[in-house]
Image (tube, rainbow, N blue to C red):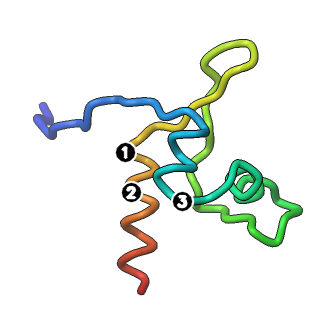
Amino acid sequence: MSTAATPPLKLLRATQVCNKLNISKTTLYAKLDKSSKYYDPHFPRQISIGAHSVAWIEHQVDSWISSKLSAV
């Protein structure tokens, strides 16, 4: 049986993701749009949390940031 610790699940709303990355909501959604020049196929996908609400899993966003930092 695996005893690997899983990070606590914390959801971030779009504004929180934007604040964490210091980007606008337009840029955030451009990172998810395949037709945008800012598209990033490795950027974490949002999940639906309601009829008109989405969020991102914080540890996935943090992992994406880490991968960008290690590429520098």
Q: Is residue 40 left or right of residue 5?
A: right
Q: Label 3, on which residue? A: 22
Amino acid marked by disc 3 = Asn
Residue at the limit of the structure toward the top, as seen here: 51
How many marks can you see? 3
User: For the point 43% across and 63% down, which residue is it?
Assistant: 65
Q: Crowding at label 1, few (<14), some or many (≥20) Cα neighbours within 10 Å? A: some
Q: Are marks 1 and 3 in contact (CB under 8 Å)?
A: no
Q: Give the image quarter of residue 6.
A: top left
Image quarter in which the C terminus is found? bottom left
Q: Whole-Å distance between the Cαs marked 1 and 2? A: 6 Å
> Mark 1, mark 3: which one is toward the viewer?
3
Q: Are marks 1 and 2 in contact (CB under 8 Å)?
A: yes
Q: Label 1, on which residue? A: 59
- Nearer to us in this view, 50 or 27: 27
Q: Is residue 55 above or below residue 25?
A: above
Residue 13 position within the rendered picture, expressed as x and y whole percent measured from the top left: 55, 33
Q: Give the image quarter of residue 68.
A: bottom left
Disc 1 is placed on an element classified as: helix
User: For the point 57% across and 31% down, which residue is it?
Assistant: 55
Q: Whole-Å distance between the Cαs marked 1 and 3? A: 17 Å
Q: Label 2, on which residue? A: 63
Disc 2 is placed on an element classified as: helix
Q: Is residue 53 left or right of residue 71?
A: right
Q: Crowding at label 3, few (<14), some or many (≥20) Cα neighbours within 10 Å? A: few
